[in-house]
Amino acid sequence: MTEKANLKFTAEHEWLDIQGKTATIGITDYAADKLGDVVFVELPKAGSTVQAGRVVGEIESTKSVGELFAPVDGTVLEANSVVVDSPELVNEDPFGKGWMIKVEVADASVFDSAGLLDLDAYTALVGE
Amino acid sequence: MSDSPTPRSQITERHSPLHRLHVDAGASFTDFAGWQMPVSYGSDLAEHHAVRRAAGIFDISHMAEISVTGLDAAAFLDYALAGKMSTLSLMQAKYSLLLDERAGIVDDLIVYHNADGEYLVVANAGNHDVAVEELVARAAGFDVTVTDVSDATSLIAVQGPRALEILEATEGLTVLDGQQPFADLKYYWSTGAAFGDGTVFVGRTGYTGEDGFELYVDTASAEQLWRALVAAGEPLGLVPAGLASRDTLRLEAGMPLYGHELGRDVLPVQAGLARVVHFTKEGDFVGRAAAEAGPPEGARVLVGLVSDGRRAGRAGYGVFAGDTAVGEITSGALSPTLEHPIAMAFVDPQYSEPGTVLDLDVRGTRIPATVTALPFYTREKN
């Protein structure tokens, strides 16, 4: 996993590990803790197009349902089939094996204009 | 990720007398009827499985305890509640309902007959005030005293197949002379024990579908009792368990939760609780006429629904027969024990027969579900 300080975050409690035009996306430990034990994950198919702000997946715990939002416009390169088979990875390793999708954007500048937060700003947001 | 944080504006936010222990144990908290209560201590699934396989300890001090004493206590409860309390033996307990005049359910409660002319009524935290108000109002004309003793009383539940061993191993917890030993207590019976300088009232009751006990203790001794139970229980697999696992446990056991399966707009018979209403008892009781008349023709009834896969229907989701809306889910989750989705729902009576296949509308996706008799889970009895 990448150092947390090198990740970007959203107000919907998702993290992005950006490498060029591609971002690996997951949910934060804060979000995983709030959900409780995750028991079901549904992710978009590889090759599908996603739009910023739209719901692209679902993350269910025993007690509630969370939604995965696309933080940017782009194309899904890969969905993490391991986390679909073992949803507990979302709680056990949210920044590592619990990743959700890899999304490719048309141009790396898309990330700059997506209103993403750095770690300090995200930490301030969740108040922890 | 969408996330709706608990509002910080809860002016009446209350803490259990055991709050500090929960914080130290790493609990996360949720608002329940104005109380900040532990929702889990790390993994709600692990807590759920611990209760099914070994034991869990729950702080349910937010529940309301109401003492009813006096010469007319039994007659008063027969009038105020749907069940017949006057036939309760000493130390026996009974599940009952507080009905309004229309036979709507004001609260569901447990009544313990804990001494001659003395009863303890345990009500839900969310109905604390209304339960006290209704009982006080209904006491007019009876020689009875209704006292809210909730602040002085803490409630700890030890639930699971090893609960008995744990109570027996708890240092300083000793059954009083002349009272039933824990091992001899039948389900829905109670006993008295000494702990420290005080006494603990112990019922073989619970809300998990497992064997277990509920311990009513003076608030001043609650922390010490919790510590003693945990010390005795940890070697036997006891873990602290929060409200998240309590909810999945009671759902598997087909037990109703007020505000979900029960409410003012629900008559007992609709929720499968006709057995709780004692129609043959003499004299009037609040809600009798309306309960006897029953709900209107075609009123929905509570059923269990099971489905395949892992996607659970949740409270508020629609239930369909083809394109026709025929019901609504009141509680639902992926059952940790059974490993398939389960739900309770109110459905039109013609769709309530076990085996009927219906559809759940899970956020726009139709998922087939089969009506099944409650409970979903029954423990193996020794």
Image: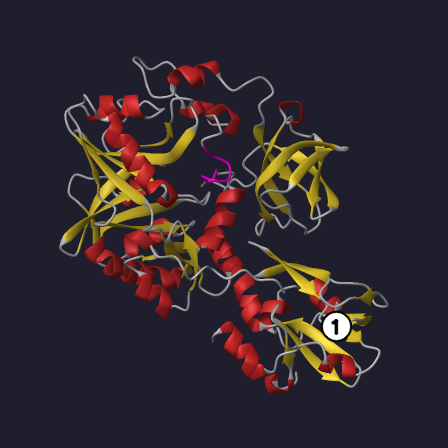
Q: Position of residue A73 (x, y in %)?
A: 78, 71
Please tell me which residue lies in front, B369 or A48: A48
Q: Residue at 78% across / 66% down in the picture? A: A51
Q: Position of residue B115 (x, y in %)?
A: 18, 33
Going by the picture, which residue comes out furthest to the right?
Answer: A47
The residue wearing badge 1 is: A72
Asked if residue A20 is positioned above or below residue B142 in the image, the reply reads: below
Based on the picture, tell me whether residue B163 belongs to the magenta stretch.
no
Based on the picture, tell me whether residue B259 belongs to the magenta stretch.
yes
Tell me the quarter of the picture where residue A3 sits.
Answer: bottom right
Q: Residue at 24% across / 61% down in the picture? A: B224
Q: Which residues are magenta?
A: B256-263
Mark 1: secondary structure: loop
Q: Is residue A59 left or right of residue B207?
A: right
Q: Examine the rendering and report whether any part of residue A96 can be seen.
A: yes
Image quarter in which the N terminus of chain A is found:
bottom right
